Image (cartoon, rainbow, N blue to C red):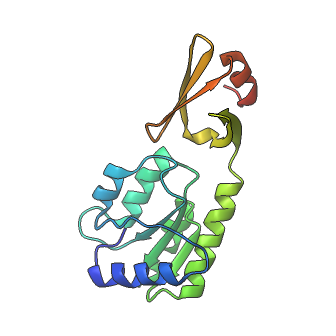
Amino acid sequence: CEDEPIAQEVLSTLLKQCAIPSSQTVFSSGVALLEAYYPGCCDLILMDIIMDGLSGVETVARIRSKDPDVSIAFLTSSPDFTMEGYRHRVDRYLLKPVEKEELEEALELAARNRKHQPAITLTIQKREQTVPHAHILFAEQQGHALNLHLTSGEILRTTMKLTSLNKMLPPP
């Protein structure tokens, strides 16, 4: 989420040069990011702090209210917002111009964080699929099938009893 087109281009180019493969969606404002955001939609948010309208700090505060687990890196030309980063549990603080090595470190950290999220593994269409707990909205039993509704809007269907799923998840 970066409001300056040149900075967007630089970040996009750096991401493509990184050893860790990634895909990206660019947002020019915090409002645009918040409209599209749902828990689990991305592994890392690169957030500019100083933007017109909704600041990066305000945007991150709203994201954290929905998703406490997503990795976030603040992007800024000013080190004045370090305390805001700590308060909102930001994983990295990248000073502009962003160095490729620092960006790769942020990608590696996001990949590790994603790997260590609590999750369940289900058999969906004869394939095992891992679903992080935070991505589950609710489950419903329909006959012998279980429908798992995810934050992305996706519905996973498997053969399982709701009581079996309940044993796999932490309370409540």
Query: What residue occupies the far front of the structure in this picture?
Result: 126
Where does the C terminus fall, quadrant-wise? top right
Which residue appears at 68% of the width and 17% of the height? 161
Tell me which corner region of the image, top left, top right, bottom left or bottom right, holds residue 54.
bottom left
Where does the N terminus fall, quadrant-wise? bottom left
Q: Image height check: is 3 above or below 78?
A: above
Residue 33 position in % (x across, y down)? 34, 57
Which residue appears at 60% of the width and 21% of the height? 146
Which residue appears at 75% of the width and 24% of the height? 167
Tell me which corner region of the image, top left, top right, bottom left or bottom right, holds residue 124.
top right
- Asked whether 163 or 61 is in front, the reply is 163
- Asked whether 95 or 35 is in front, the reply is 35
Query: What residue occupies the far top of the structure in this picture?
Result: 143
Tell me which corner region of the image, top left, top right, bottom left or bottom right, holds residue 134.
top right
Residue 48 position in % (x across, y down)? 39, 72
- Asked whether 82 or 10 is in front, the reply is 10
Judge left or right: residue 29 versus residue 23: left
Q: Image height check: is 90 above or below 126?
A: below
Q: Image height check: is 52 above or below 170?
A: below
Residue 85 position in % (x across, y down)? 52, 67
Which residue appears at 54% of the width and 86% of the height? 100
